[in-house]
Image: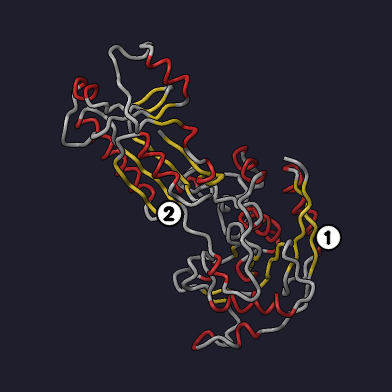
Amino acid sequence: MGGRTRKLRRGWGFSSDVGALERELNAIYNPYGVSLTVKTDNSIEGNMEWDDRAVGADKGDGMMNLSGSGFFSSETAEMKALRKLYQNRNKKYDKHAYYIFILNEAIATDQPKSVVQGDMPRGKQFGYIFTSAVASESMAWLIAHELGHGMFTLEHSFNINYSGPAYQGKTDNLMDYPASPSTHGGAHLAAFQWNVMANPAALTWFDSEEDGMAKAETPYVRLLLHGGARNAGDNSSFYFASVNVKNDYGNDGVMIHKSVDSAKAIINLINAQKDNSIQSLDIFSHGNSSGLYMIKGASTSKYISEDEMNENNLYAPLYLNSSAKNIEMLGTLFSGDYRLSEDRGYISDISLAKFTNSCKIEI
């Protein structure tokens, strides 16, 4: 990764040594080719308009209300009010810098106050740190962790796509949680995280005049595709295996769980998604290093004989490339005359722009 310099501006409410904070952050990020410059901005220090304009019990309580935000997947009214207050009052606002608001306390109806230390939405410009829940010696680490989300679109290391929830708090990865809220975590980043940092998803800016949610990113998609075998029993096994994986994902993303019987069906499903939206692709089917075997009409209730497949041109595989197809047609991988369906296809027919940088593919 080439060296890059990033600007970080801190919001009001934090009086620690800026030079020390910058050194600690760069001690974490310099080994990965990133240099951070930290500046303070006290232009709205003590301004509680974002809180005073709240309604009901939230009005004037001095706490940032996160209830209903899905932990920053969307803006609450108070979050939006603070963000717009800063953007509209500060003539030096820089859309290319990253901002951390240092606040005292947050409240979320579904979380204990002690848990809410801070957050920064992936690929976003603004983050929030709550000092009442953070030990002073952990502040630099927490900011580095949140910048991993906001600046580089990194996910937690214990995301289901990576080590999994069972490893939360058990690694020295920067994107893990510390073993205890009173301690800070590690600073290690794995090779796959370097790749994401080198090509982070495009930053989604909160426009100063528009509702931030009008620009909210579409929830990512998980594709679970199964089937394609001549044997109905095999297709049933593929289906139940896909259900188990779907259950493991839980509600993490939009699930598209479908039976497929041709390369064309797989290609069309993938290419129909929005760019940078597919977080995982799981395919349950027969295949080898040359591609996936796909039989048109494959189902969990019907057996398709080789004669039926050939007589009706039902063989519709997804090939690695044209060379793989030519080798198969020469008979080096199969005995018998396999007549190809027009619904066959190649990996190159798939738009790679549909996948996120951290997409996980299992076949």
Residue at the (35%, 11%) spot, across then down: 331
> From mark 1 to mark 2, how far is it between C-alphas?
40 Å
Q: Is residue 14 found left or right of 84 in the rendered image?
A: right
From the image, which quarter does the C terminus lie in? top left
Above or below 351: residue 203: below
Above or below 297: residue 159: below
Amino acid type, mark 2: Gly
Which residue matches tag 1?
Answer: 19
Q: Position of residue 3 (x, y in %)?
A: 78, 44
Q: Which of marks 1 and 2 is in front?
A: 2
Q: Is residue 44 found left or right of 289 in the rendered image?
A: right
Which residue matches tag 2?
Answer: 253
Residue at the (52%, 41%) spot, across then down: 352
- The mark nearer the N terminus, 1 or 2, is 1
Which secondary structure lies at badge 1?
Answer: helix
Amino acid type, mark 1: Gly
Q: Where is residue 306 in the image (x, y as percent from the top left)?
A: 21, 20
Above or below 327: residue 166: below
Q: Position of residue 270 (x, y in %)?
A: 43, 44
Q: Is residue 105 found left or right of 255 in the rendered image?
A: right
